[in-house]
Amino acid sequence: MNIVIAAVLLFFVNVAGAQTVTIDFTRARESSLGIPWTEDGFTVASLTQQSPLGGGLFVTAVSSGPMVGNPPPAGLLQFRAGGGVNPVPLVSAILTNDLQLSFNLLSVDFYSFTSSLSATDYARVYSSAGGSFDLLGTPSQTTLTFGGSAWENLSYVKVDLFSQGGFSSSQMLLDNFSVQVNAVPEPSSLYIVLLLIAGRLWKNSRFFPSCRHA
């Protein structure tokens, strides 16, 4: 019976366990830096067609360090909207788990080329659970934290940037998507636990045959 109890406890520990990962958009120099970006079991894809004039979604690939002027540091997800494209497109990114596991969004680092985004811009973070966070007015180099049911058990996180300033270009950068993967039991583990319980119950019924006729 002790074996069964231990197996059941181990099973529920595995179910309850969750893994936290940080998507930091860094790889070896020889690796691809393009979109879609895959890292730690997650993929960031663009929902917007890249513009030949420079608009769209990119991963920065220049030297790292504190953000000072232009170009931005390496390892950031860069959004570019506007800049001579007419009509100005909505630039969107979507983050999903490669195994279609649900996850919680914990935090994201926000950067801007200016002190904050322009008041004419539209920039938001959305979640599949109905979460919505307005990025306007957020100071550059800020870590945004997320909590509550609107940011838990998600199938995706989406980020939009839209420049309402006509041909003027708007840019923002995000980094360090910290997410907690909600673990699920492996079918083989569940099968073993059920088999142990069934075996123990059958063995007990042999020793107590009256129980079968109760």
Image (tube, rainbow, N blue to C red):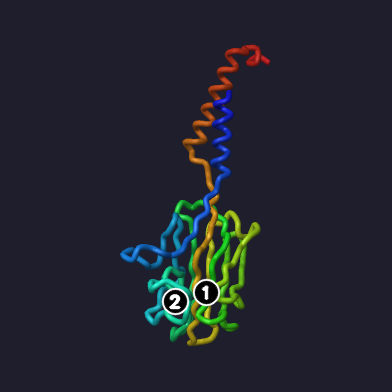
Q: Residue at x 60, y 12 (%)?
A: 207
Return the residue nearer the eye: 51 or 65: 65
Note whether residue 82 is visible: yes
Which amino acid does the dot numbered 2 rest on? Pro
Q: Residues within 10 Å of mark 2 (few under 14, many from 20)?
A: many
Above or below, 30 relative to 170: above
x then y, percent, for residue 197:
56, 26
Q: In the figure, is residue 75 to the left or right of 120?
A: left
Image coordinates of residue 55 in percent, x first then y, are 43, 78
In the rendered image, which quarter contains the C terminus? top right
In the image, farthest residue toward the left: 30
Who comes first in sequence, dot 2 or dot 1?
A: 2
x 49%, y 71%: residue: 92
* Image quadrant where residue 211 sits: top right
Image location of residue 122, percent across then percent down:
57, 77
Q: Which mark is residue 72?
A: 2
Q: Residue furthest right?
A: 214
- The residue to which callout 1 is attached is 111
State the image coordinates of residue 100 (x, y, percent, origin top left). Answer: 49, 52
Residue in view at x 49 percent, y 59 percent? 22
Q: Are dots 2 and 1 in contact, CB under 8 Å?
A: yes
Check disc 1 and give the amino acid type.
Tyr
